[in-house]
Amino acid sequence: MGKLQIGNNGSSYRANKRRSLVRTIRKRQATFLGHVMSRRKLEHLVITGKFEGKRSRGRQREKIMDGLATWLGPGKVSDILPAVKDMDLWRDMIANAYKQGT
């Protein structure tokens, strides 16, 4: 019984599947963000607000807003928040980022 070996074609196929999965997840996160930001409720406050107190020790967790900011292009959260208010602009930003596949 030998080892199961995967050639270059198989590994590149798996990598492409992973990239498309990450792209789909980012798109869903962005559309959910647009949904949450369109209403001024508790979820909106949680995403845009700051908490009092100390930060916990160790490496800080990556924030969803920071990940979306790099995926969408502008690079800063402060650039994204005004764009979310304009629904057509927000949809175009999501579509362009999804097409680029980054």
Image (cartoon, rainbow, N blue to C red):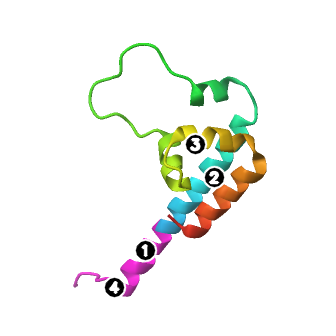
Assign the magenta stretch its main secondary structure: helix
* The magenta segment: 1-18
Nearest to the eye among marks 2 and 4: give it.
2
Nearest to the eye among marks 3 and 1: give it.
3
Residue occupied by mark 2: 28
Mark 3 vs mark 4: which is more N-terminal?
Answer: 4
Q: Residue at x 67, y 23 (%)?
A: 42
- From the viewer's side, name the closer residue of 17 and 33: 33
Q: Residue at x 66, y 29 (%)?
A: 44
Nearest to the eye among marks 3 and 4: give it.
3
Identity, as a three-letter code, of the amino acid under mark 1: Arg
Residue occupied by mark 3: 79
- The outermost residue toward the left is 2
Q: Is residue 3 magenta?
A: yes
Residue count near mark 4 (Cα–Cα under 10 Å), binned few <14, some 14–19, many ≥20: few
Drawn side of residue 6 relative to residue 14, left or right: left
Cβ atoms under marks 2 and 4 closer than 8 Å:
no
**Mark-to-mark CA distance, 3 and 4:** 40 Å
Percent x, y of residue 99: 61, 69
Mark 3 vs mark 1: which is more N-terminal?
Answer: 1
Marker disc for residue 8: 4
Residue occupied by mark 1: 14
Identity, as a three-letter code, of the amino acid under mark 4: Asn
Residue count near mark 2 (Cα–Cα under 10 Å), binned few <14, some 14–19, many ≥20: few
